Image (tube, rainbow, N blue to C red):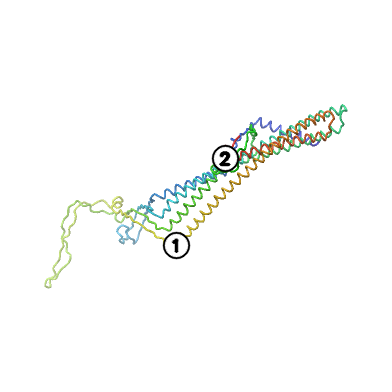
Amino acid sequence: MNKVLLFFLVCFLATNAFAQTSEGTAVKVWTLKECVDYALANNLDVQRSQYNVESAEINHLQSKMAMFPSLNGSISTGYNWGRSINPVTNEFTTQEIRSLSPNANSSVTLFNGLRIQNTIRQNARDHEASEQDLLKTKNDVALNVINLYINVIFNKELLENAKSQLSSSQEQLERTKKQVAAGALPLSNELNLDAQVATNELNVINNENSLNFSLLRLKQALQLPASTAMDVEVPDVSVEDLVIDQSSQQIFEIAKQTMPEIRSAELKVRSSYYAAKAARGNLYPRLSLSGSINSNYSSANDIARLIPDGGSEIQVVQIGYWDSNGTPMPVYRNNVIPTGSMSDGYGYRDQLSDNIFRSVGLTLTIPIFNGLQARAGVRRAVIAERVAEISAKQVHQTLRQNVETAFTDAVAASKSYNSSLRQVQAREEAYRITKQRFDIGAANYVEYRVAENDLFQGRSDLARAKYNFIFRKKLLDFYQGKPLGF
């Protein structure tokens, strides 16, 4: 009686909670496609892989930009006082000086052992590999969601099976009560059926808990709070249409062409190959071209100056004496002085224009000895290439083993389903006959209970075999690049 009261209390609370949910917000019924799309949009591993793709794209773009000349500019200004050097005339002065020096320089690598070109090829493969890794992450998320989705459907079917068993037991209990009251059956039959009803009620509660837990795991995979009202759509799947018509080797050959992890591993091998070639570029001389342009301004030169007009005048200047029989005689020299007008001052624009300095040069750097850094880098790159090749082989082997395992599991699940199907058909007929005999008193309660339990256990086994086969067949379809859905 305690179990019966507990069952009705749970049913009341569940019904009340469902009514409140219905009155507040309607429970959304999710399809498999909606679950997968939502998981892909919110999964953190997928988002991390997307950022890895963006980072690889940036690295690829940066390596291509290394082919172009660099260009940098700078400007410096200062204020000096006391004894200092005029930055324009390089003469000592004691006046206060304000200075300004703009500069621009550029350089481009003409040859460095094809390091830049091989780095571009390396980063291009890394970018493509990151895109394949993103697809692999999405596939893993989708497979996990499909597995959890099928598990929810499986638990829903088990719950319906438990409810059907409970309903059958309750109907039989009511019928037996009438027969016991009429004296046609002993009281022990009624008591045994009452205990069976309580047991079936507990089975319903347990299956409800299993369903709720499977829904919780699905919500967690979708990054949804546990309080989210959620239900899933039960697709109409015909197991008879799920035929395994290919061998594991045929599926593996298709999987090698469709699985992103295979493509990613191959791209990483190519990336390591170009990384080794780029490392060898450090063993070759490096030739670079550089150029610069700069100017300066000094307030010490910002004074009035003569602006020539093209003319000139002769000015006689005494430069010394010479001895003419004991009489000093002056010596003169004619200086040619340009004529013109005086300017207001030697300002920023004029000084910066007049003081422009340009330079261009070639630099050849020859590596002779650098602590074996270049050769050690080459050896590390070659080792990384060998490791990438081993990793690619391991990915191929893992995929082959996964396909073979999935194929074996699918074949076994198919056999289990067919066997369970025949078992349920036989147990349904046995239960029908036993029930008829029990109703007329020709069979005892133990025979009836065994037949009933066998039937509903068979139905549970059939549901388990059915959805296990569905998932295994979908996994084979996944390896062949077919859409994941019902």
- In the rendered image, which quarter is residue 144 located in? top right
Query: Which residue lies under the disc numbered 2?
Result: 480
User: Taking 121 as reference, is 199 above or below it?
Assistant: above
How crowded pointer 2 is (Cα within 10 Å; few <14, some 14-19, many 20+) is rated as many
Give the residue at the far bottom of this rendering. 326
* Residue 136 location (% of width, % of height): 56, 44
Say whether residue 190 is visible: no
Mark 2 or mark 1, which is nearer the start of the sequence?
Answer: 1
Give whichever of 403, 300 is nearer the camera: 403
How crowded pointer 1 is (Cα within 10 Å; few <14, some 14-19, many 20+) is rated as few
Spatial separation of the CA atoms under disc 1 and disc 2? 52 Å
Q: Nearer the viewer, mark 1 or mark 2?
A: 2
What's the amino acid at mark 1?
Asn
Give whichever of 436, 122 is nearer the camera: 436
Say whether residue 275 is visible: yes
Please give the count of numbered marks on the rendered protein: 2
Please state, as top left, top right, bottom left or bottom right, where the C terminus lies in the image.
top right
Q: Residue at x 40, y 50 (%)?
A: 67
What's the amino acid at mark 2?
Gln
Q: Residue at x 42, y 48 (%)?
A: 65
SS under mark 2: loop
Horizontal side of 396 relative to 443 (left or right) equals left
- In the rendered image, which quarter is residue 433 located in? top right
Query: Which residue lies under the disc numbered 1?
Result: 370
Residue 1, numbered label: none
* Residue 299 location (% of width, % of height): 31, 55
User: Taking 194 as reference, is 399 above or below it?
Assistant: below
* Residue 17 location (% of width, % of height): 69, 33
